[in-house]
Image (cartoon, grey):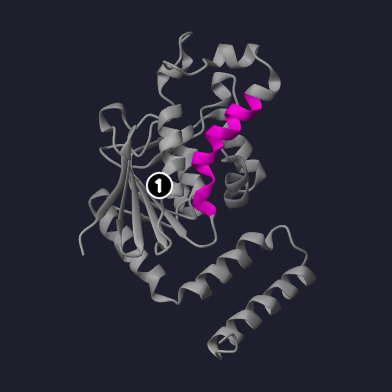
Amino acid sequence: MSSLTLLDKDGVRLTVDDAVATVTLTNPAKRNAQSPALWRALAEAGQQLPGSVRVVVLRGEGKSFSAGLDRQAFTPEGFAGEPSFLEMGRGPEHEMDALIAEYQEAFTWWRRNDIVSVAAVQGHAIGAGFQLALACDLRVCAQDVQFAMRETSLGLVPDLTGTKPLVHLVGYARALEICATGRYVHAEEAERTGLANLVVPADQLDGAVTDLAAALLAAPRDAVIETKALLAGAATRSLDEQRAAERAAQGRRLRDLAGAGE
């Protein structure tokens, strides 16, 4: 079966091949720099996912996954048709909050329980690029990967949903140091600290992601969905609450396997 292209606009392409969807950032000439238009396209890609999709792969064309926010955002004019940072800062607080919330939608849907999302990360993953990789459940990285959170050095904060997964993966102290210094995190540290599930040579990145997607599809879908929900909620539950959640999930699985719902 050949891939079906469902979206191709504003630097984002969505293709679907059976149970695997691929979201590709398609502006390698600008190292897949991000803009509000790209964020809206990413949010639209999430809305257009067919129900048959179980694994979503996120990748960037060219030498870099994403070098972060397009530098045009830092000019007084900003992007055509969009409020500039200066205009946002001078406008009503509720309008600024609503606009940032809209931008965050591009980074939120990757965590849905009905899919497992995998970022294939090579080269630069800076700022918004780092946060986009963090939005995914899993990260497979090339040996040349360079993560960095540069927002603080620009007088801003990481606001595209990246702070929670970063702290969850590497701990508060390391997350603070990474964000406050804006330094690079390279492949060895990314793998050692849990940012990367797997690090491979750049020419093996696509193959490693394909193999991981196949492994994720091997288990029954509902079992994966239930397991993801259990793990995702574990950090905010007490042990007794987690035990109860496990019992309830297992009960649903056993009833399903026994055909009790038929």
What residue occupies the far front of the structure in this picture?
A: 262
Where does label 1 land, which residue? 187
Q: Is residue 10 above or below residue 174?
A: above
Q: Quadrant of residue 259?
A: bottom right
Q: Residue placed at 33% from the left, 34% from the top?
A: 11
What residue occupies the far left of the structure in this picture?
A: 2
- What type of secondary structure mainly makes up the magenta span? helix
Q: Quadrant of residue 41?
A: top left
Q: Residue placed at 59% from the left, 85% from the top?
A: 261
Q: Quadrant of the N terminus?
A: bottom left
**Residue 81 shows in the view:** yes
Q: In the rendered structure, which segment of residues is drawn in magenta? A: 96-111
Task: For mark 1, give the secondary structure.
Answer: helix
Q: Give neighbour class at mark 1: few <14, some 14-19, many 20+ (Cα, 10 Å).
A: many
| Rendered location of residue 253, percent (x, y) | 58, 81
Horizontally, residue 97 falls left or right of residue 154, namely right
In front here: 211 or 199? 211
Q: Residue placed at 60% from the left, 34% from the top?
A: 101
| Rendered location of residue 100, percent (x, y) | 59, 29
Three-letter code for the amino acid on which mark 1 is drawn: Ala
